[in-house]
Image (cartoon, rainbow, N blue to C red):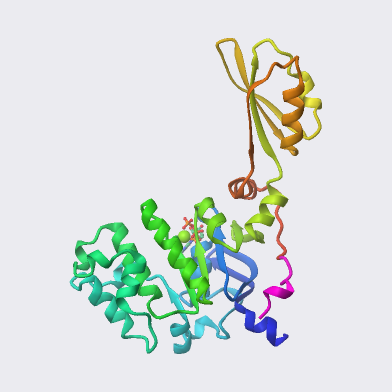
Amino acid sequence: MQSGICDSIVASLGDLSKHYGSRKALNAVSFDIRKGEVFGLLGPNGAGKTTLLECLTGLRRPTSGSVQVLGHDPGSRAPELRRLMAVQPQEAALFPQLSVRETVDLWASFYGNHDPVDEVLERVGLAGEASQRVKALSGGQARRLLLAVTVIGRPRLLVLDEPAAGLDPQAKERLWDVIRKQREDGGTVLLTTHDMNEAAELCDRVAVLVDGRIAACDTPARLVSELASTSTVTFTTPAGTDLGPLHALPGVTVVEVAREADGRRTVQLRTTDGDLTLRRIAADDQLAAADLQVSRGGLDTVFRSLATGGPGRREEAPIRKEEKE
Ligand SMILES: Nc1ncnc2c1ncn2[C@@H]1O[C@H](COP(=O)(O)OP(=O)(O)OP(=O)(O)O)[C@@H](O)[C@H]1O
Ligand SMILES: [Mg+2]
């Protein structure tokens, strides 16, 4: 492997499979995580996301295939890797009698090189709770503390399993800032999420896992442009209007009456060319269309399509020159 490319790859999975008895939780999964990116793992419940994180962090042995993280096999539990990779710990890892600051101090003591404790408490939004006991924290506050102890040691790879679960909108914003700071500082993040908005906002690339297989892996923008090319056009028209001609409009794939009330119908069209469909409908005097709206597909459309067995794209885009070290 060329050294430039090698240095730019933080983690690499090759044909990774994990079976629990007869259940194939992961089935020949391959992808690379590149230095400095926020990589999102998406997929329905039971798709294999947590299993994948567990294999990647050395908590589980794969059934077959290879995993390399920062030059190590995570299964070897190399002490070096523990310093370089931080995994958001389970709640049980915290001591209920310690205060918030004592907890973060304790974690900081595990690392020779760490961020200032007060600065990290500020970053995760716990500066006001520094002297509060862990056992008295709310669920969301406890999750913020878990984030604090995960980032305190300046890990090169931060691994977070559904970090936004249970956070209020403000705490979510803070979490996103923490993740972005990790990237700004040259670190890498691997996270799982069910929030497509979060994935689109935060992630440089995402992989969609469905039934233990990678259904797609690319930047959110490229996935949306290639897999969510349909838009929905909605309008109202008088109840008796003939909708037959709508089927013949270029790009229109589905015509549905969503509602009928007070002598008007609400019609929804799926189309591969939202702008053209909108113009044609607006210009059609027979339709007497009103309340015209167009909504374009996003990452949620891609996700729904892939999760229900729609066409996937497995290949990764090649590493572009400027993305190499
Ligand atoms: N310890 C285990 N023993 C047996 N089966 C397991 C075990 N852990 C997970 N599984 C199964 O493996 C599959 C993948 O589970 P996993 O927890 O990795 O999914 P996930 O994508 O993280 O789901 P979620 O979105 O609900 O967190 C599921 O069918 C699950 O039932
Ligand atoms: Mg999970």
Asked where in the image residue 210 lies, by quadrant, the reply is bottom right
Query: How many labels sit on residues?
Result: 0
Residue 207 part of the magenta segment:
no
- Residue 9 visible (yes or no): yes
Q: Nearer the viewer, residue 227 or 289?
A: 289
Residue 14 picture quarter: bottom right
Residue at (45, 75) in percent of width and height: 59
The percent position of residue 224, horizontal first and vertical second, equals 66, 51
Give the x, y percent position of residue 325: 66, 81
Q: Is residue 282 left or right of residue 141?
A: right
> What's the residue at 37%, 71% (across, down)?
89
Depth check, front residue: 149 or 320: 320
Instruction: Please name whichever residue, 20 or 214, is drawn nearer the observer in this view of the structure.
Output: 214
Q: Which residues are magenta?
A: 317-325
Q: Where residue 44 sits in the image (x, y, percent)?
A: 53, 52
Q: Quadrant of the N terminus?
A: bottom right
The residue depicted at 65 percent of the width and 70 percent of the height is 30
Magenta region, main secondary structure: loop
Whether residue 23 is visible to the viewer of this picture, yes or no, is no
Q: Is residue 173 left or right of residue 127?
A: right
Q: Which residue is pictured at 57% across the width and 74% down the height?
A: 36
Q: Is residue 95 above or below residue 280?
A: below
Q: Position of residue 48 (x, y in %)?
A: 53, 61
Direction from residue 250 to residue 30 in the image, left or right: left
Q: Is residue 42 above or below residue 67?
A: above
Quadrant hosting residue 140: bottom left
In the image: residue 103, left or right of residue 166: left
